[in-house]
Amino acid sequence: MSDPVVAIVGRPNVGKSTIFNRIAGERISIVEDTPGVTRDRIYAHSEWLGQRFSLIDTGGIDIGDEPFVTQIQEQAEIAIDEADVIILIVSIKEGITDADEKVARILYQTDKPVIVAVNKVDNPEMRAEIYDFYSLGLGDPLPISGSHGIGLGDLLEKVCHYFPQKTVESDSETINFSFIGRPNVGKSSLVNAILGENRVIVSNIEGTTRDAIDTPFETDNGEQFTVIDTAGIRKRGKVYENTEKYSVLRALRAIDRSDVVLVVLDAATGIREQDKKVAGYAHEAGRGIIIVVNKWDAVKKDSYTMTEFEKMIRQEFQYLDYAPIIFVSATTKQRLNQLSKLIKRVSENQQRRIKSAVLNDVLMDAIARNPTPTENGKRLKVYYGTQVAIKPPTFVIFVNDPELVHFSYERYLRNQFRESFDFQGTPLHLIARKRK
Ligand code: GDP
Ligand code: GDP
């Protein structure tokens, strides 16, 4: 099951991104004195007393040229669609404004918990004024100060209190995967084609609202998969669904919930800048990755061959050198029957565990063949290695000085691991630690 989702809503300049940054623990979105500044990040992972959750700053999702009141209403709708718990931020400085009331009215429509946080309560004397905010009709207002970090603990405690109780882990046999990619590459066509070829499992478990659109299915040989919903797959015709930030958000959510991510490219249009962004998210998340080149039927045989296209992909996505590439067509179903086998293999590789003895044989062999580098007369010494995690496979190597492990040598070791074991489709993390 994926982490619960918390969304922050409110009109511009109440302090949403300040609070987002505080909670996310890093300065990951830009705060300026201008209202409605563009932000870098709108999605982050966070933790409160061991409880993990994802955080969305809906203020960062700008919806085209809409007037700002429409924008904040749509942002509130996104919060209702995406979140388990919603935080409505208002400001003690201005009191309740028309815009606050408009947002509140949208939030009346949801059964999801909404917490009103009154921001900019920078000192205790101001606390008396927060009672005005009861009139928003959304329960007890909570005084906070984003910039001073006051009251955020109480806020998070209240937020966590509302998280849905973890239900029984969904069938652990099933492999979760998603298609991600820019609009029109053929994600929904691929989902439909695959579901059309396999037996869709009708769930009789009361669906959690957000995950209910995921579809479990079974292949002829009894393997179970669940295809995770992403933007573009279930079009509901809402205005914001075509905005870039929202598709990015949906892609990030889908990646979080997937074991294997299928990055879809469109053979007919070639590789675009947005493809690289999307692929980058999957790579950073450490999930299994397969590159799916769709619409292969639409490519004229003499315009380019598979080898040429593959070369281009390797050139453009150098960091994804571990990802297998498959050329398919949702329309003619070409090679779609190979997809489930590939997904299964990549998922297994993500969970592969290498025994320390075997790993150290490979490691020592690698060092014997290509001696460790030196710097300022000091030579890197590698003592031993061990695998510490899966999904993705993560290795710690104990050395005399981690500073001496240069990127190129690290890459060399990683490649040696890849040559010795099947890690196709999964990133490998390598951490150098000083031996005590
Ligand atoms: P957003 O548009 O809702 O995301 O608001 P920002 O986070 O960009 O903040 C708007 C302005 O309010 C900035 O100038 C912040 O420095 C300021 N601000 C944020 N939180 C506080 C607070 O707790 N106290 C005070 N006095 N100012 C704050
Ligand atoms: P999404 O936005 O990524 O979900 O893309 P869609 O599945 O809606 O497909 C976008 C367009 O591409 C539609 O007009 C599809 O009919 C077309 N399309 C999808 N897959 C293929 C394919 O394999 N071959 C061809 N020729 N067209 C395709």
Image (cartoon, grey):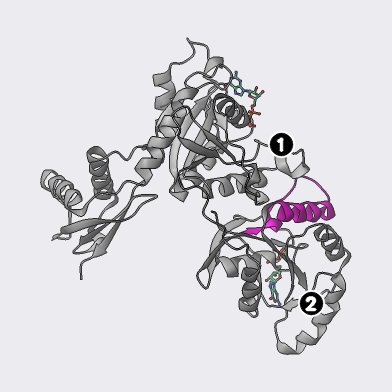
Q: Residue 358: x percent and y percent?
A: 18, 48
**Is disc 2 surrounded by few (<14), some (14 to 19) or many (20+) residues within 10 Å?**
many
**For this rendering, which residue is in front, 62 or 330?**
330
**For this rendering, which residue is in front, 252 or 192?**
192
- Residue at 76% x, 85% y is 127
- Residue at 72% x, 50% y is 62
The quadrant of the picture occupied by the N terminus is bottom right
The quadrant of the picture occupied by the C terminus is bottom left
Confirm whether residue 148 shows in the render.
Answer: no
Note whether ligand 2 is within 8 Å of mark 1. yes
Amino acid at dot 2? Ile
- Left or right: 39 with respect to 368? right
The reply to whether callout 2 and callout 1 are in contact (CB within 8 Å) is no
Q: Nearer the viewer, mark 2 or mark 1?
A: 1
Q: Which residues are magenta?
A: 55-81
Label 1: which residue?
Answer: 235
- Left or right: 288 with respect to 248? left
Real-space Cα distance between discs 2 and 1?
39 Å
Label 2: which residue?
Answer: 92
Q: From the viewer's perspective, is residue 301 above or below residue 116?
A: above
Q: Secondary structure at mark 1?
A: loop
Q: From the viewer's perspective, is residue 343 above or below residue 75?
A: above
- Left or right: 288 with respect to 112? left
Q: Classify residue 412 by image quadrant.
A: top left
Q: Main secondary structure of the magenta part?
A: helix
- Residue at 56% x, 48% y is 252
